[in-house]
Image: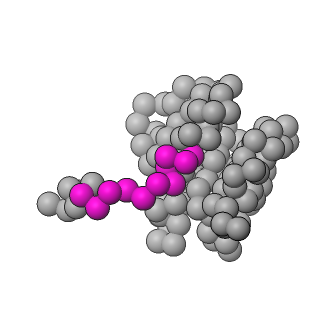
Amino acid sequence: MAVKPRVLIVDDSWSMRQTLRLLLSPDFECAIAEDGASALDQARKSPPDIIVSDVSMEGMDGYELCRLVRAEPPLEKVPFLFISGHAPRPGIPAAADAYLLKPVQPTVLLARLQEMLQPRPAFAAAQGQS
């Protein structure tokens, strides 16, 4: 049996965390965090293959979580997807790999996560090294 990719779901809404867990658990091993600080702690202890985070959370919001994840060498390349009920603020979510608006269609979310987990072609990485 193949090992499932590990997704860290971060949302301050219990119902959204449970909905995402139910949706993703057939294809992913799901870890759950109810805020940015606990998500960062979990990611440091056991780096996920991908992070799915709400934007608006008490304390550390999703933007700050993404900034801190990108600043840590063991985590900096972990794909990061925002799911939010609000349109992105200009320039803010630039560090995230994707941004989806709620309500998210399950097929769209699953397709985006699978796409984000695919290895990037070598030529794309080489283009950034001029």
The residue depicted at 53 percent of the width and 36 percent of the height is 99
Q: How is the image coloured?
A: one colour
Q: Nearer the viewer, residue 17 or 70?
A: 17
Task: Specify the quadrant that holds the C terminus.
Answer: bottom left
Count of numbered circles in the view? 0
Left or right: where does residue 96 sit relative to residue 17? left
| 118 inside magenta stretch | yes
Kindly report the secondary structure that dominates the magenta region of the rendered protein.
helix
The x, y position of residue 80, in whole percent, is 54, 50
Q: Work out which residue is located at the far front of the displayed protein and give it.
A: 1
Q: Is residue 51 visible?
A: yes
Q: Nearer the viewer, residue 4 or 59?
A: 4
Left or right: where does residue 72 sit relative to residue 32? left
User: Residue 23's quadrant in the figure?
Assistant: top right
Q: Work out which residue is located at the far left of the displayed protein and give it.
A: 130
Left or right: where does residue 8 sit relative to residue 95? right
Q: Nearer the viewer, residue 22 or 78?
A: 22
User: Residue 81's quadrant in the figure?
Assistant: top right
Q: Is residue 12 visible?
A: no
The residue depicted at 75 percent of the width and 50 percent of the height is 26
The residue depicted at 32 percent of the width and 57 percent of the height is 121
The x, y position of residue 17, in whole percent, is 79, 44
Q: Which residues are magenta?
A: 113-123
Q: Considering only vertical position in the picture, is 83 above or below 4?
A: above
The x, y position of residue 43, in whole percent, is 65, 66
The residue depicted at 42 percent of the width and 43 percent of the height is 94
User: Residue 19's quadrant in the figure?
Assistant: top right
Q: Considering only vertical position in the picture, is 15 above or below 75?
A: above
Q: Considering only vertical position in the picture, is 111 above or below 86?
A: below
Task: Specify the quadrant that holds the N terminus.
Answer: bottom right
| 117 inside magenta stretch | yes
The x, y position of residue 119, in whole percent, is 42, 59
